[in-house]
Image (cartoon, rainbow, N blue to C red):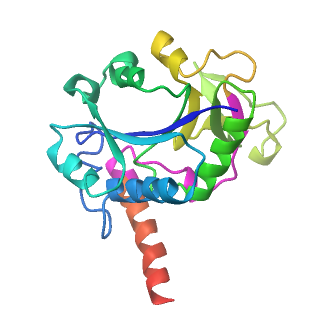
C-alpha cells in the first residue's frame, strides 16, 4: 500500500489565461473551488497521509485566498512559478515531503469531483503501478506530417475508425523520487503510467485559455443556478 501526498500547486500568473486562479469565476474563484475540495477531503477522508497547496508567498492575492482554508501551505520560490520553467525547478519542493507517491491535482479543473479523486487515488494507493494517468477516447481522424495516424481507406465514418486516446489533465499520480531524479512523471514502460479510461464528461475539462475560462464559467454558473432554484 502506497503512502500518498495530495498536492495542488497553484500560481497567480499564467501566460494563456491571465490571473485565472484569482479572478471572478461566477461567484467564486478557481482557487476557492479546489481548496474547498481539499479541505473536505482532509476532514472526511483518510486516503492521504498529507494534503498541501503549494504557493509562492509573493503571489499575495493567491496566498490570501489560500489562508482562509484549513489546508497546509507549502512555500514555492519565485523561480518555480515562472512560465516555461524546467520541470525540476517547478517541483523542487517535493524533496521536503516524506511520502513516496504524489497525487497531483489541477487547480484549474473546476468540475473534478471529490468522489473521483478519492476513487482513483485509492486505486493508485492499493495497486502495484508506479504512476496513474487518466485518458479519454477520441474517435476522429488524426494526422502527423500530412500522414494519417488512424485513417483507413474505405472507411469514411469516424465511428468506424480505431480510436486514439487523449490525456486528461485534471489529476494524476506518480512516484515522488522518480520525479525529483528525472523530471518525468513516468518512464513510459509497461503500466508506467497505468492508463485509466474515463467516460466523456465535463469533469475532464481544465482551463488553459480565455475561451476555456468563459465556457467553463458558463457551465458552472448554469449548474449552480439550477441547484439554487431547486
Q: Which residue is at the far top?
A: 181
Q: The N terminus appears in which quarter of the rendering? A: top right
**Residue 57 location, x and y as percent?**
18, 37
At a point 56% along the width and 57% down the height, the residue shown is: 114
Q: Of 3 and 84, which appears nearest the observer?
A: 3
Residue 204 painted magenta: yes
Q: How many marks?
A: 0
At a point 67% along the width and 44% down the height, the residue shown is: 122
At a point 53% along the width and 39% down the height, the residue shown is: 49
Q: In this view, does 145 lie above or below 46?
A: above
Q: Is residue 175 above or below residue 2?
A: above
Residue 84 visible, this angle:
yes
User: Magenta segment range?
Assistant: 194-212
Residue 111 visible, this angle:
no
Q: Is residue 138 left or right of residue 212?
A: right
Q: In this view, does 183 lie to the left or right of 10?
A: right
Q: Which residue is at the far bottom?
A: 230
Q: Image quadrant of residue 68?
A: bottom left
Q: Image quadrant of residue 139?
A: top right
**Residue 40 location, x and y as percent?**
48, 60
At a point 66% along the width and 24% down the height, the residue shown is: 130
**Residue 18 location, x and y as percent?**
24, 45
**Residue 5 location, x and y as percent?**
51, 36
Residue 48 painted magenta: no
Q: Is residue 35 above or below residue 169?
A: below
Amino acid at each position: 500500500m502506497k503512502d500518498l501526498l495530495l498536492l495542488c500547486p497553484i500560481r497567480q500568473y499564467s501566460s494563456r489565461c491571465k490571473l485565472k486562479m484569482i479572478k471572478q469565476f461566477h461567484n467564486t474563484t478557481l482557487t476557492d473551488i479546489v481548496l474547498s475540495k481539499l479541505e473536505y477531503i482532509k476532514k472526511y477522508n483518510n486516503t492521504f497521509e498529507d494534503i498541501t497547496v503549494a504557493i509562492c508567498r509573493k503571489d499575495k492575492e493567491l496566498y490570501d485566498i489560500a489562508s482562509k482554508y484549513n489546508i497546509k501551505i507549502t512555500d514555492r520560490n519565485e523561480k518555480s512559478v515562472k512560465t516555461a520553467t524546467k520541470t525540476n525547478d517547478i517541483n523542487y519542493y517535493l524533496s521536503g515531503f516524506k511520502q513516496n507517491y504524489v497525487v497531483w491535482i489541477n487547480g484549474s479543473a473546476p468540475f473534478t469531483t471529490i468522489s473521483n479523486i478519492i476513487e482513483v487515488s485509492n486505486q493508485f494507493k492499493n495497486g502495484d503501478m508506479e504512476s496513474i494517468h487518466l485518458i479519454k477516447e477520441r474517435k476522429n481522424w488524426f494526422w502527423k506530417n500530412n500522414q494519417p495516424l488512424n485513417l483507413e481507406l474505405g472507411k469514411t465514418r469516424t465511428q468506424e475508425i480505431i480510436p486514439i486516446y487523449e490525456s486528461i489533465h485534471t489529476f494524476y499520480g506518480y512516484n515522488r523520487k522518480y520525479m525529483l531524479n528525472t523530471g518525468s512523471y513516468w518512464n513510459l514502460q509497461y503500466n508506467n503510467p497505468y492508463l485509466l479510461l474515463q467516460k466523456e464528461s465535463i469533469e475532464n475539462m481544465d482551463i488553459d485559455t480565455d475561451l476555456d475560462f468563459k465556457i467553463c464559467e458558463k457551465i458552472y454558473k448554469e449548474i449552480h443556478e439550477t441547484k439554487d432554484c431547486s
